[in-house]
């Protein structure tokens, strides 16, 4: 049986409990669920919010393709990813990745791998809104993130 | 042909999407960059950063600048992605 | 400021959302939360439930000592662990580990490391209850789990 | 001296905890195992697995079988742990 990932791009907030319920459903052979939640940091008081722009259509399609690869690679029982767009205040959730598997390491690896992908290869762009000013600026891509993704190819 | 722009390209060009008629000598991604850079001063100032600008054709990433534009309905131009 | 782990051993179920809220509190410099939830598998229809026995007092004390080490080692902004005891039916949660940090890799590593510890060094014992019979038997320790913990010492 | 047993040790011995008076020649963990194995047939059958039985003194793990029992109020005996 092929396991289909659950992928959503939305402006609304989400509940991890509700999403994990969706992910695991009635499957009785899941022993491990790992979730990653990305949250808007204040960066030492510098920021008031992030603004997320995305490429509608392509974002969902690319995430789905990559999620299917992750399911196959780590033999996951399920993979769910939700990425928000629009203005996201400090302390609010930006992204959720949840991976389900029989044993724990696959769920850790699946969620970690998908996050590395999202950071570098999913068509989303972040803009920072400064606290106490009208200033905003686009976040540059981090070399560290490209490096994080490349670690997985060593294992192939 | 539809061109779409994201993030700082969209803001700098003050344009989210536009429809263009490409000249017949614009055959691949590299040609497109050259053509865009010559449109006017604003485009020239944006496309002098061509080396970091990324491309998707029909919503699929394209790395190779020699990729043909044949069959392209929608070409997206954007900076490196910073999601997650 | 020293960050104190949140450790509980209880028979009641838990809500990941509620626990993560406890963990992150009002801290505005958390960018990543990773949770691991361990769930009772049916093992291909073989099991109806697990029964968890623990050493009261020692379990909480040992988990707290190790959680403090994990916070220090991975520079975590918070670490929470809940381990249930008593009878746990197929599909129900057994354990939750949640790690919070500025950047994502520390949260992944902190939660993974703490799980490896729990599997091999926290005073809990699992008994399997068979489906459609009165049979039950104690689970043996897996060499794979000892091996999983030893991988972290290579990084010291 | 309180002795506590967990998991299959508790079940096989049909005893969760007991208070014992240790003879003065039982000075360390190894001595304790020897003494327990000689109590009766039931204890003998359990403590023939001494190599996999683990020990905590005053709720702290003890790996070394030569560890002294001095100051011990509570000694726990149990199989390898299988939590998580």
Image (spheres, coloured by chain):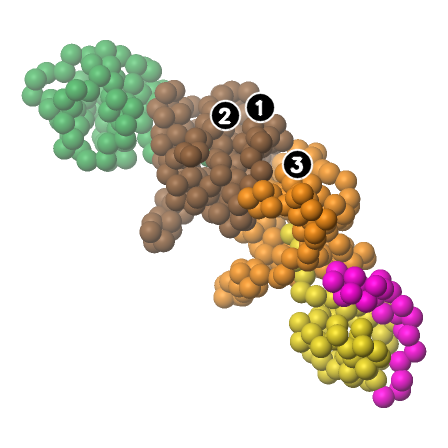
Chain colours: A orange, B yellow, C brown, D green
Q: Does residue B5 appear anywhere in the picture? A: no
Quadrant in which the N terminus of chain B is drawn = bottom right
The reply to whether the C-beta atoms of the residues labelled 1 and 3 are less than 8 Å apart is no
Q: Write down the chain letter for disc 2.
A: C
How crowded pointer 1 is (Cα within 10 Å; few <14, some 14-19, many 20+) is rated as some
| Residue C147 image offset from top left, x and y in percent | 37, 48
Alpha carbon of mark 3 to alpha carbon of mark 2: how far? 20 Å
Q: Which residue is mark 2?
A: C84
Q: Write down the chain letter for disc 3.
A: A
Q: Which residue is mark 1?
A: C13
Q: Is residue B12 left or right of residue A47?
A: right
The reply to whether the C-beta atoms of the residues labelled 2 and 1 are less than 8 Å apart is yes
Q: Write down the chain letter for disc 1.
A: C
Q: Quadrant of the rendered structure where residue D3 is?
A: top left
Q: What numbered label is drawn on residue A16?
A: 3
Question: In terms of secondary structure, where does tag 1 sit?
Answer: loop
Which is nearer the N-term, disc 2 or disc 1? 1
Discs 2 and 1 carry the same chain letter: yes
Question: In terms of secondary structure, where does tag 2 sit?
Answer: strand
The reply to whether the C-beta atoms of the residues labelled 3 and 2 are less than 8 Å apart is no
Question: In terms of secondary structure, where does tag 3 sit?
Answer: helix
Discs 1 and 3 carry the same chain letter: no
Q: Is residue D45 left or right of residue A106?
A: left
Observer-nearest of A8 and B79 = B79
């Amino acid at each position: 049986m092929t396991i289909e990932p659950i992928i959503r791009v939305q402006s609304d907030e989400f509940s991890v409990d509700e999403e994990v319920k969706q992910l695991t459903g009635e499957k009785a052979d899941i022993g491990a669920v790992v979730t990653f939640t990305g949250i808007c940091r204040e960066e030492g008081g510098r920021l008031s919010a992030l603004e997320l722009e995305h490429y509608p259509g392509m974002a969902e399609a690319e995430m789905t393709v990559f999620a299917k690869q992750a399911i196959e690679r780590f033999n996951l029982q399920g993979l769910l990813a939700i990425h928000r767009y629009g203005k996201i205040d400090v302390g609010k959730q930006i992204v959720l990745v949840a991976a389900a598997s029989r044993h724990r390491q696959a769920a850790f690896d699946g969620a970690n791998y998908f996050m590395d992908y999202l950071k570098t290869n999913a068509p989303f762009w972040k803009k920072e809104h400064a606290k106490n000013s009208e200033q905003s600026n686009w976040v540059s891509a981090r070399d560290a993130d490209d490096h994080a993704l490349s670690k997985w190819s060593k294992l192939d | 042909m539809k061109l779409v722009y994201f993030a700082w390209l969209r803001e700098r060009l003050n344009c989210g999407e536009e429809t263009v008629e490409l000249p017949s000598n614009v055959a691949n991604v590299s040609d497109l960059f050259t053509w865009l850079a010559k449109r006017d001063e604003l485009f020239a100032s944006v496309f002098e950063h061509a080396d970091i600008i990324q491309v998707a054709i029909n919503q699929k990433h394209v790395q190779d600048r020699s990729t043909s534009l044949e069959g392209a309905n929608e070409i997206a131009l954007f900076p490196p992605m910073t999601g997650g």
